[in-house]
Amino acid sequence: MSTFAQKPTNILEKLLLSHPDKFKKLTDNPEKYRLQILYTQIDRDAKNKPTLTTYAYRSDSTEYFYPASTVKLAASVLALEKLNSLKIDKAATLYTLKNRPSQLEIKTDSTSASGLPSIEHYIKKILLVSDDNAFNRLYEFLGQRPFNESMQSKGFYGVRITHRLSISLPQIENQYTNPIQLVNAEGKTLFKQEEAFNDRPYGANKPILIGKGTMNDKGVVEDHPLDFSLKNAYPLQAQHLFLQRLMLPEAFAKEDQFKISKEDYQFLYRYMSMYPTESINPEYTDKFAAYCKFLYYGSEKKATLNPSIRIYNKVGDAYGFLLDNAYVVDFDKKIEFIVTAVLLCNEDEIFNDDKYDYFSIGFPFYKNLGETIYEYELKRPKKYLPDLSHLRLDYTK
């Protein structure tokens, strides 16, 4: 048992420990579950300017976890920044070309109304259903080294984006990114980018070994841990800070804000908080409303949605790691808070066997965590209630 579990040092720890029926399994052995949580309280002044107070549970930038799809939100924002620097609209057609056998050429998108791919449509698919292929196109648009250097220059430390998702490629192939072309509605080329190669590959300085066994391609479990040293890395502190800057830019100095337009912010907020069942373009008939809403809803297929709550978030799940970055708002009760968390749902400590404990451990944890913090925020006194009118968005068109 963790010795810390006897001495709560902040409100987040106190909330976890005061609900043993919900959290005792995890708080008794947080190292096994690699549990980390950051929770930010938001207090407004008379002019609605926010002050942020963050509490941590086992937040440790040196403890590795696989970030899974959480890297996609960063790619979305940086892609919009790049488009703004080029003075090109996000609706411009993006042709992904190929220069190597490992690369994919993408000139159509059957899910878009026009049948053509665009940064705008890729971001929609990322935020609505966490589309892996959409992320890969943004990764190629950004380029491996510029993607990483941009994150570092903005103060998101410890970030390492080394590969595409859902496609197994040798390390060197991920160092290459496709030639691309941006074209307007009349077919005029607005921007061309040659194939890029990052000649200084990213990787950890030493092996990152997790687990007891790894299943190989033949379905046989080998008796050794999985090495994550060449995989993506995105520490929880960096993820939490990224979401704070995105959702509450006015709390940060101008030089620390993202270089995107007001319309870009509204676009991101809309699709971060939209339920897949509300989306018309693209349309998702195979998804349920709370899909990708782990915090508070636990991603339950038959969850009863609270009509006054919206959750602006990005989740991730892979290798048993389950993550959520969420800014939660209740318009009627005037509640707002931010939670970023990760835990490993892999009781047998075997990787690549697709036997992960998301449903028995992970989703219930996020549902309980969201509800517990929400209930606390309901009672937390505030001198000034927040004006959240800028987040009241139209989801019908």
Image: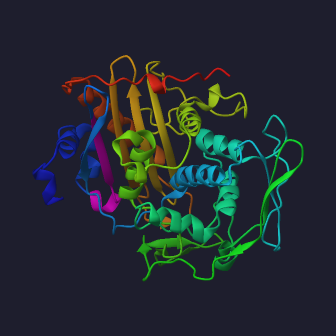
Image coords of residue 43 (percent x, y): 25, 33
Q: In the displayed structure, would residue 181 be above or below residue 92? A: below
Relative placement, left or right, of 210 versus 374 is right
> Quadrant location of residue 277?
top right
Q: Is residue 185 visible?
A: yes
For this rendering, which residue is in front, 365 or 15? 15
Task: Based on the picture, tell me whether residue 40 belongs to the magenta stretch.
Answer: yes
Q: Identify which residue, 146 or 17, lies in the foreground.
A: 146
Point out the stretch of residues depicted in magenta.
30-42
The image quarter containing residue 333 is: top left
* Residue depicted at x 33% and y 55%: 35
Q: Is residue 384 above or below residue 83?
A: above
Q: Residue placed at 42% from the left, 40% from the top? A: 326
Where residue 5 appears, as percent x and y from the top left, is 16, 52
Which residue is farthest left?
7
**Residue occupying the point 35% across, 40% down:** 338
Residue 247 within the segment the image draws in magenta: no
